[in-house]
Image: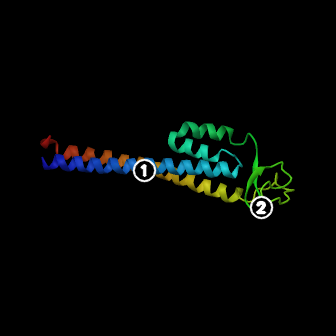
Amino acid sequence: MVVSSSISLIAMIMMLFVSLLFVAERVLFGLAAYHDAQSQGNPDAVIWGLAVGFLGIIPGIIYLCVRGSGRRLVRCANCGYPHDATDFCCPKCGEKNPAAAEANPYAQVLASRARKEMIGGIAVIAAGILLMILVMLFFGVFMMRYRAFF
């Protein structure tokens, strides 16, 4: 009976780790979608981040298909306020914006952050797969060794 209860405890701990890895993967992919949408000037960055974070891969695929289309927003170089790329000046501070359509001062920072979060999400998925393989190997060896107790 001691062997059976220790197997149950180990299984619960492993399932807790897998659950935590699942949550970490969702958070990282949601943040990656959010920051990528911000770097693209998408006004719906929060919605995309939440959709990918909560609903998973299907909204992520949809986002990747539509990420370059639609209205293009830029951020003011003076105050950081997001506005349409065709505006001649910032609606908040009035700063002239002659090259707003060509350059977004925050795009590179947000795109870099999105890449790092995407790599982190992929690493978490790989760690989860590795953990599941190790769990299956552990229980396979354990069951072969202690068959007489069951």
Quadrant in which residue 110 is drawn: bottom right
**Real-space CA distance between mark 2 and mark 1, rounded to the nearest whole angstrom:** 38 Å
* Residue identifier under label 2: 77
Q: Residue at x 18, y 48 (%)?
A: 5
* Residue identifier under label 1: 21
**Relative to residue 123, is residue 81 drawn left or right?**
right
**Relative to residue 137, is residue 88 drawn left or right?**
right
Image location (x, y in percent) of residue 101: 82, 51
- Sort mark 1 into few (<14), some (14-19) or many (20+) by Cα contacts within 10 Å: many
Q: Quadrant of the C terminus?
A: top left
Q: Residue at x 45, y 48 (%)?
A: 23
Secondary-structure class at tag 2: loop
Residue at the bottom extreme? 78
The front one of 51 and 120 is 51
**Relative to residue 83, is residue 145 drawn left or right?**
left
Residue 76: which disc? Answer: none
CB of mark 2 within 8 Å of CB of mark 1?
Answer: no
**Mark 2 or mark 1, earlier in chain:** 1
Secondary-structure class at tag 1: helix
Image location (x, y in percent) of residue 96: 86, 59
Residue 11, relative to residue 116: is it above or below?
Answer: above
- Sort mark 2 into few (<14), some (14-19) or many (20+) by Cα contacts within 10 Å: some
Image location (x, y in percent) of residue 36: 64, 50
The front one of 48 and 109 is 48
* Tally of numbered tags: 2
Image location (x, y in percent) of residue 28: 52, 51
Q: Residue at x 77, y 56 (%)?
A: 92
Q: Amino acid at mark 2?
A: Ala
Q: Amino acid at mark 1?
A: Leu
Q: Nearer the viewer, mark 2 or mark 1?
A: 2
